[in-house]
Amino acid sequence: AGVDVIGDRAFASSGVAAVTLKDGVNIGNGAFLNCASVTATDLSKAAEIGDDAFRNTAISSAVLTNATKIGSYAFANTLLTEVTLGKDLVTLGENPFFGCNIATFGKAEDIMFNGIKVGQNVVEDIDVSDGVKVIGGALYSVTSKGLQLISYPIGKSEGSFTVADGTVRIGARACEGAQFSAVTLPAALTAIGDKAFYGCDYLSTVIFTGYYAPLFEEEFDEAYFTADNYPYVSDWNGKGLEISKYDILNVSTNFNAVYFGANFVDHIGHIDRTVVAVRPANGENYDSFVMKLYFGKIVSGANAATNDALQVIALIRALPDAKNITLENESAVNYARNAYNSLPNNEQKAIVDNATGSKLVESENIIEYLKNLSDSGNTPQDSSESNAENSFGKFMKNNLVGFIVAAAVAVAFVVYVVLSQKKAKTAAGDSETETPSTEETAETSSDSEEAENADDEISEETDGETAESDISDETDDLQK
């Protein structure tokens, strides 16, 4: 429990049953290989798990949330039915879960209704980490050249399987023992690993969509070896080799090691039933010796995209969505258009169109529209404030008629109120003239009295001024 590293084959083929691991421990290649007594083990603390580390043990579940690396065949032929992978996983070897009866690498999520769990839903498309994906329940790794199929869950009971678009390699033993009867291989596929579809006893149709036939990889297997260079009959993996006269010698040593290849269903030269291959009508390298040995019948299907067409498809798909196109994308759009125009025939262009729709044309139209705006000095801004202004402008434009009607109603209402008030005042004035009230009469009398007093005061003042004028005249006479 206190060690940081468990070395290669440290406990291989021993009787150890219980394993306690330290946080961040690295487990070497074959560390617990063939330890049949190892069952429930907390693997959530393991950082790296080497090749064949727990192969042929009795482990039935694995929580690998802290693992950064899981080596080739690490849990091969165990009792695993459930696997939990973590976001730090970077490296996957050749099918670490070969021979495990796993139904999906997806994740079960509870279905809730009013706070009560009413069922479960399995999510089969997950970005586990930057380097690992689950697509359709199958496990893939992300490489610089594209996807690599690592493990198909052989507990899955679906009748057909389509390998994810963009997959460039199917790993060794990736689908060995699967139950599907038909498989479709993507256009980007370049290689199929050793025994990738070996033991797929229901497989009857393989559909190739790539312009070039993929390479079939082979690995040395000691079960193929015989000193006389003739395969012996055995029950290895439940099947006798019984290879035909077409032995494929890849290595010459003093004991004549032999590779026999087993990519599809059975070994080359020993196909006990007809498997049909559907190849592109315009494809190349589908008439090879090996293809004819694996497949009892090869028929032509639809034309395939050439490598050039695949590159054009990738260029168009890489363009931003219509709502995110800017003038900065003009060169990328033009480059995609030139690549499209350089395709040799309309057939390949049609294949591109089927794969990408009208995305290229839409991108070109948006670029042209943005250029026209720029030339007229109305280049749209990217700020949220500008977006808000544009949204408000659209709102005003869309509701202009409504605003005009509302304004007219408001004006009419104001006019009506003003006229009503004026009419009411006129009516009140007429009423006051006809029947003045007591208070109004008193006020009128008071006003009359005040007017009379004012007249008296004015009269007195006038008399005084007249007297003063007389005195002044008399004074003038005396002076004379």
Image: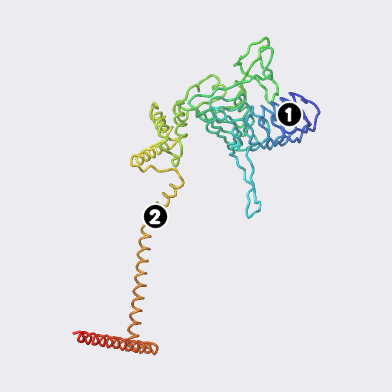
Q: Nearer the viewer, residue 377 or 347?
A: 377
Instruction: Report the residue marked by disc 1.
Output: 56
Instruction: Report the residue marked by disc 2.
Output: 396
In the rendered image, the residue lying farthest to the front is 479
Q: Amino acid at mark 1?
A: Asn
Colour scheme: rainbow
User: Can I make out residue 453 in this image?
Assistant: yes
Q: Quadrant of the C terminus?
A: bottom left
Q: Amino acid at mark 2?
A: Met
Disc on res. 197: none
| Mark 1 element type | loop
Between disc 1 and disc 2, whose residue precedes?
1
Name the front one of labels 1 and 2: 2
In the rendered image, the residue lying farthest to the right is 15
Count residues near mark 1 (Cα–Cα under 10 Å), then give few for <14, some for 14-19, many for 20+. many
Question: Can you tell which quarter of the image residue 342 is in?
Answer: top left
Question: Can you tell which quarter of the image residue 9 is in?
Answer: top right
User: Can I make out residue 304 in this image?
Assistant: no
